[in-house]
Amino acid sequence: MGSLSVPRLSIIIPTLGNWEVLENTLVSVLQNRPSLSEVVVVHNSHYEDPYDLKDEVRFVEAPSGSRLVDLINAGLAAARSELIHVLACGAVVDDGWDTEAVRHFADSRVAAVAPVVLELNCPARVLSAGCEWLPGGRERAHASGRSSSDLETNGRWTGPDTVAAFYRRSALGEVGTFDATLSPTFAAIDLSLRLIRGGYRTLLEPASRVMIDASLFGCDGPFRRAWQRERLFWRHADRHGWLRSAAAHGWHVAAETLGNLPRWRAVAYAAGRLIGACDRRGARVRTIEPVTLGSVGAAENRRVDAGHAMPPSQSRSGAGKASQAHSRVR
């Protein structure tokens, strides 16, 4: 199987330039790399590749100023596999973390699978097991703060978030990729809701786990969060029925506004809701088109070598270089 063979899984790692955190993630991924897989790193500034990982990793340089959602979309376009794994820069994985999640895609109705995201310094604590989208127009990290041994796979669960997610490429080709006008959490929820609307299933796989430092688990400010909640509410209010959604929405907005009084957060929250209600932009999504050398990162878009299509005993050869890189960084 040569370098032109199609990998079983494309692992996309977007980064905004935190190279030390990126290298720690690459150490983990390359040491535990699944067979028949490729690793694609997407960044928006020049990366020197000081540990010479070009034979093990594809580096795709997106335009300067690209935001995280833009980087993920560029990675989706550059990926060569039908199954795509989005993994946050800073995440750490163990051997076989992908196995149970990938098995779900034997069902053609499954378009997305969420692994469980654990606190790196306290692996028994769940940071996120995907996202929930509540009828009133509010997002919530599923099972956040719970013990990893106490997870529910049902309830109001909606889909994976961008910290760790598995997707079916052909399904994204039908409904479009991430809305680049939204922040990562809301873009992930919006994509999951579009997949569900398209007749696909999104699943949670408790046996698939990744870890990340809680400090890297970002959150929007009150204005932006309220603005994007409002936009997403009007876009998907019919999911729970208009009457139920409108009643829950009014109660939620009133309760949250009063709960923030008299602090400045109440003003920011109310302004975000107002602007979001007036913002009628549709989803700025894109279909998946292969990245060409003339469009994104010509100098950094490198093909994976033949070793990525070898059996596990040989395909994990990148672990040696990654370990050396890790020791140098430390």
Image: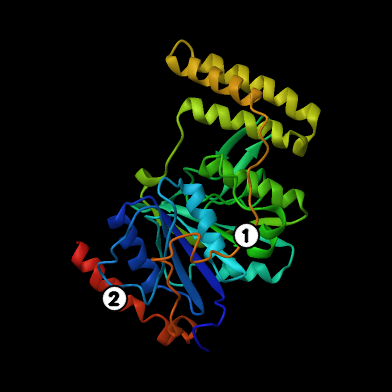
Badge 1 marks a residue whose secondary structure is: loop
Image coords of residue 298 (percent x, y): 43, 65
Q: Quickly name the residue at label 2.
A: 321
CA distance separating discs 2 and 1: 32 Å
Image coords of residue 257 (percent x, y): 55, 17
> For residue 45, which numbered disc appears in the image?
none
Q: At 59% across and 69% down in the image, what residue appears?
A: 102
Q: Is residue 163 visible?
A: no
Q: Nearer the viewer, residue 148 or 193?
A: 193
Which-is-in-front pick, marks 2 and 1? 1
Q: Nearer the viewer, residue 46 or 258?
A: 46
Badge 2 marks a residue whose secondary structure is: helix
Dot 1: few (<14), some (14–19), or many (≥20) neighbours within 10 Å?
A: many
226 shown above or below 60: above
Q: What is the quadrant of residue 271 in the picture?
A: top right
Which amino acid type is shown beneath numbered disc 1? Answer: Ile
Answer with mark 2 or mark 1, whichever residue precedes in sequence.
1
Which amino acid type is shown beneath numbered disc 2? Answer: Lys
Q: What is the quadrant of residue 238 in the picture?
A: top right
> For residue 288, which numbered disc appears in the image?
1
Q: At 71% across and 37% down in the image, what residue appears?
A: 236
